[in-house]
Amino acid sequence: MSVNELIEKLNQCPTDVSILAALLQTEGEECEQLAVAAMDCMTREVGVEVYLRGLVEMSNVCIHNCYYCGIRRDADVARYTVTEQQIIDATKECSNLGYGSMVLQSGELPTDGYVDFVCRVVERMKKETRSDVQPDGVGITLSLGVLSKPQYQRLFDAGAHRFLLRIESSNEALFKKIHPPSQKLEERYVAIAHLAEIGFQTGTGVMIGLPTQTIQMLANDIVMFQQLDIDMVGMGPFLPSANTPMANWPIATPLERLQLGLNMIAVTRLACRDINIASTTALEALHPNGRNLGLAYGANVAMPNFSPFDKRSSYKLYDNKPVLNENIDAIAIIEKTGRPVARYQKGDPLHYFSRQGLKATD
Ligand code: SAH
């Protein structure tokens, strides 16, 4: 069946795993058709604009020991937490450049002390970026892992309004293979439910091309996005990290993982329609133009790195992280794709409003 025939079928039945899997397997010249269809869908559902988030990798301190992750508890890496002022400085820099939103990401430290720190930072970020163009200050996405519901609530009350918590894989057996027994898939589902109940714009994601991961598992991941009624997806190819137990587990070639990562973005767009999808740094690790390729397959969010330079090499989730020296005019690079870049707009996922029968405000 051709890509276009498969897409017609998907439109009839967006949760059909065999159709999703067939589309994910698109290769060669047909990839172009898949990209074009995903871009059509994106244009119709959320528009062509790319929304910006300035990314600050706040801390690499982590209590968990995920087998794939370069900042796992046992990894031999200098631990840091950026200062409140460094985050505020990065936020103001972004806000002046026209970035409408920030992402604060870190390892997992589910203590009240750390949550207090983030709440303080979030309150200041909102307050200190108010302007005529963004009367309510910048939008704030957090990505801090699993916390308790009261801790999430405090972060929401402080002014964060989006949260990204990757499920990593919806396949129970694969999840167990790549995490120590203390990490439970079920806990992540519960956390995502808490986030949605509190009112966060809620995101998740998976790693693509993990050892023993099949196309069917990835198709099921997309069904999981639909079932959770998720507003945002951030996902990218798995990249081995030398300092981890998974450093040498067998995986597909870089080119295969890159194409699968791009196909996942396109098929997720076709299945989930009005959500926000980020084009992630992991794509750039596999291709010098990887993040722009993600945007060409239906992603509509870019997250340029604004972490302090001296900390970037310590937030090394995987080897060959490409943004160590990035101090680029990210907007100009994105504009090379021909896509307009939204300025001074939060870029909220339309799905958040449509699932509640509301209309977006900016
Ligand atoms: N601890 C936070 C976020 C920090 S890590 C949380 O759990 O939400 C951010 C993401 O990086 C992880 O969710 C994971 O999907 C991704 N990541 C970690 N190690 C990786 C690797 N080796 N290759 C690709 N992505 C990786």
Image (spheres, rainbow, N blue to C red):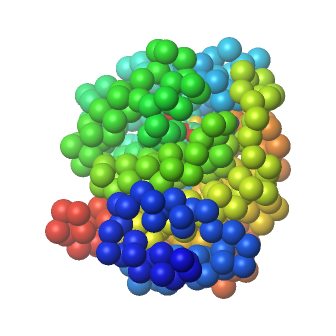
Q: Where is residue 127 in the image (x, y as percent from the top left)?
A: 40, 51
Query: To which quarter of the image does residue 106 belong?
Result: top right
Q: Position of residue 110 (x, y in %)?
A: 43, 22
Q: Is residue 199 above or below residue 173?
A: below
Task: Tell me, yes or no, if residue 151 can be seen here.
Answer: no
**Residue nearest the observer in this picture, 207 or 74:** 207
| Residue beneath the point at 67% across and 36% down | 211
| Residue beneath the point at 66% across and 78% down | 30
Task: Tell me, yes or no, if residue 242 can be seen here.
Answer: yes
Q: In this view, does 290 lie above or below 189?
A: below
| Residue beneath the point at 37% across and 49% down | 224
Q: Position of residue 192 (x, y in %)?
A: 33, 40
**Residue nearest the observer in this picture, 56 or 171:** 171
Quarter of the image for the C terminus: give it.
bottom left
| The residue positioned farthest toward the front in the image shown | 1
Quarter of the image for the N terminus: give it.
bottom right
Query: To which quarter of the image does residue 292 belong?
Result: bottom right
